[in-house]
Amino acid sequence: MIIGGLGVFLRAVPQKLWEWCISQSTMTITVKDDDLAFTWVKEWFLEQKFLKRIRRVDLDTTLRHEQLEFIPAPGLHWFWHSGRPFRVEFHRSEYREGWSRKRTEELTFVTVGRDQQYLRQFVSGIVECHKQNARGASSLFVFDDGWMEVEGYSARSLDSVVLVPGEKEQLVLDIEKFKGAKERYRVLGVPYHRGYLFYGPPGTGKTSLVSALAAEFKLSIYLISLTDFNDKTLMKAMRDIPANSIILFEDIDCLKTGRARPDNAELSKKLPGAPADKPDSMEQFGVTLSGLLNALDGFSAPEDVLFVMTTNKIEALDDALLRPGRIDYRLYLGKACDDQKIELYRRFFPNASPQKAREFVEMHPLAETMAEFQGLLLRREQDDSCGGGRTGFQPVAFDFRDTD
């Protein structure tokens, strides 16, 4: 028994010795799919020549907007990079969580050496590749157990958004000043982020303006629906948002999180003995007001980002949400003036004269917002196309006052 046990132990010695030598002479980097760098690594694969020699590949349509691309399939792959041998292991596992099926992926890079400086150079190359691919592009991300890019999203151009003369230029100038003042914020010790509030009736172009600003400044939009979060998950999602991004809270007045708290006069109107409302901090589900405020300017609030909120009713928002530092710039988008309508008309029909554009505007006074007026122009364009290119038009008495 002693001799047999000793034989088993001695057989394992060479294997253990080999594993120890490998661990002492190699370096390892692991990237998981719940990190933004996982997508960056897949983008980096597309730029490498060794990808053409890999025989086991997966088909991917998410990296370059529905273009078919090959990426390494799960398994073990070898390649050379900057004169060093690399081994990459791609692990994929699936499991059930309740009624849904979940999938996790993981990439592990192994190379020879002990100096982390080389690993930093390797990672810097991946980051630079991501910056090159992201340059000039604006994407939309939504949260689903991690940030996911929305396929098919098309950003608006800033020229296509028509505001009251001077408003758009002033807003762009404010963002340009903020983007150029990073060092000044650091010297003053002020958190480097800025909040914007776009408010006004529905259909006045608030969301379109956000999309156009993102495209103009080459920023990605991270859309947050507060009903999908609680205080803890919101904080985690905010930490995962990269710099140079727009964080968008749409229709903040429709959510209990941003609504104004009742004052003492309202509370005193309650009947004696009536149960008191449960404060925000005691809510079990959803984001509380204090949780939202901490996410905007707390210790873990993201830096180098623009916070943008849209609302139809600014009077419904809590004062704590509107103070400077959380909302630094307010822009009211109201009913469209004649100059806005004329400019939009001439964008649709560039060959039309200013007089003809003004006549069309005067014949349709019920189209009060830009969305309503744009609907008229689209209908007129369709009528012209179906009517063989007729040049005349008749006034249409659409009543938009009862529409949403």
Image (tube, rainbow, N blue to C red):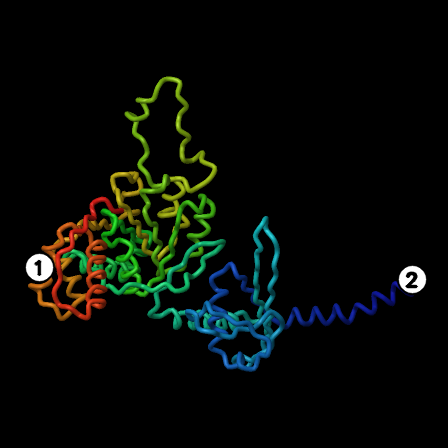
- Does any portion of residue 397 appear in the rendered image? yes
Q: Which residue is mark 1?
A: 359
Q: Quadrant of residue 73?
A: bottom right
Q: Residue at 45% across / 57% down in the picture?
A: 147
Look at the picture and state if 106 lies above or below 326.
below
Disc 2 element: helix
Q: How many numbered circles are shown?
A: 2
Q: Quadrant of the N terminus?
A: bottom right
Residue type at numbered disc 1: Glu
Q: Residue at 59% across / 48% down in the picture?
A: 98
Circle nearer the viewer, 1 or 2 = 1
Determine the residue located farthest toward the left in the rendered image.
355
Q: Quadrant of residue 19?
A: bottom right
* Left or right: 333 in relation to 14: left
Q: Residue at 28% across / 38% down in the picture?
A: 316
Q: Nearer the viewer, residue 105 or 323?
A: 105
Determine the residue located farthest toward the front in the rendered image.
387
Q: Which residue is mark 2?
A: 2
Q: Quadrant of residue 64?
A: bottom left
Local packing at callout 2 (Cα closer than 10 Å; few below 14, some 14-19, many 20+) is few
Q: Residue at 46% across / 71% down in the picture?
A: 43
Task: Answer whether labels 1 and 2 touch (C-beta < 8 Å).
Answer: no
| Mark 1 / mark 2, whichever is N-terminal | 2
